[in-house]
Image (tube, rainbow, N blue to C red):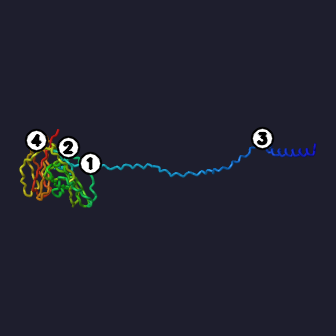
Amino acid sequence: MDFQATGYNAKMKFNLQALILLAFLPAMAGCAAGGVGLPTIVPLPTDTPPVALTPSATLPPTDTLVPSPTPSPTLTPTPEPVTYTVTENDDMFGVALRYGISLDALKAANPTVIPNMMSVGTVLLIPITPTPPSASADPDSPTQTPDPLSPLKLAMAPICYQDALGGAYCFAQLENTSNSPVENPSVHFTLVGGGTSLEMDGILPLNILPAQETMPAVAYFSAPIPEAFEVKAQITDWLPVMPDDARYLEAEIKAEPPVIAEGANFEDAAGFVEIPQGEADYVWVLGVAFGLDGQVLGLRRWEAETPLSIGASIPFTFRIYAMQGEIAELKLFVEAHANIP
C-alpha cells in the first residue's frame, strides 16, 4: 500500500468535509437559536405593466329643487254694497234707470219691497258692483265696430241732461230696422271729459223693441261727472224674438192724441190697454216726450196693478216731465207679458 497516496486522499477528503460543514454552519446556528431560516422570494419580472389607478372624474353637482315660498294671499277689500234711499217722487223703475239695471234685477235684489208701495226712506239694495272710473280717457283706443248683421242702429246722436243732484240722464234712440221684434237691446254709454272717462250700460224701458220702431235706451250717471264732457253710445247686445214665442201678448193702446200746449215741459198720458187674448202677469205703458228737434226730453213707464182681470180694458194715467226744453210730441208704447204657469 502506498501510504503517501493514501494520506493525500485522506487530506482531500477532510478538506471537502470541512467545506461542507462551513456551508451549513449559519443554518445550524439558526436551528440552535430555535429559528427557521426561509429563503427570500423575489418576484419574477412580467411583461404586464403596472395598473395605475386614475381618479374618476368629478360629477357635476345636481341642481337641488328648493321649493319657492308660497306668496301670502292679497286681501282685496270687499266693496261696500250700493244702496239707494227712496225719496218722495221715486218709483222702482226710475231707480233702476238711475243705475242702468233692469227692473226685474232690482226687484230680485229687494224681494221684501213692494214696488207700488215704497215709502220715503226705504233703502234699496242695488245689484251692481261699484267700480272706479278710468283715470283718463285714451283717445287712441279702438272703438267697437258695430255688428253688420244687427237690425239695430242709432237713430240720432246720444244726448245727456244733468239733474239737480249733479248726475246726468243719457238717452240713445234705438231703431229696429227689421220686420221682427228684438228683445233686451242694450247700449254702452261713455262720458269723456276733464281727463276722466265714465262708462255705463243703458237699458230699454221695455223688454221688446217692436219691428220698425224707435225707442230710447237710458242710463243714469251719478255725481260727480265732468263739468264738460262728450257722450258716446255703442249698441252692445240684443236678442231675436222667435215667431212662435208665446211669452208676450198682443196689446193695444186706446187713447186720444194729446193736445200739447206751447212751451209745455210736462204732459199727461191717459187711455186704456186692451188685450184681445190671453192672461197677462204684467202690463207696462211707456211714455216718451220728444223735443222740436226730435231728441228725447224725458220718459216714464207706468205699471198696471196686479192681479189683472182677463179680457178687461186696463185704464192708465201718468205724467211725463221733460228734463229740459219744450215738449213737441208724446209717444206711447205698451208691453204685456203672458202669465205662463
First in sequence: mark 4 vs mark 2: 2
Residue 100 pos. (x, y %):
21, 51
For disc 2, the neighbor class at 10 Å (few under 14, some 14 to 19, many from 20) is some
Residue ID at (6%, 50%): 256
Q: Is residue 95 visible?
A: no
Residue identifier under label 3 = 34
Q: Are marks 4 and 3 in contact (CB under 8 Å)?
A: no
Q: Is residue 164 above or below residue 252?
A: below
The reply, left or right, for residue 309 in relation to residue 50 is: left
Residue identifier under label 1 = 81
Q: Are marks 3 and 2 in contact (CB under 8 Å)?
A: no
First in sequence: mark 4 vs mark 3: 3
For disc 4, the neighbor class at 10 Å (few under 14, some 14 to 19, many from 20) is few
- For the view shown, which residue lies furthest in the front direction? 1
Residue identifier under label 2 = 113
Residue identifier under label 4 = 277
Q: Amino acid at mark 2?
A: Val
Q: Amino acid at mark 1?
A: Pro
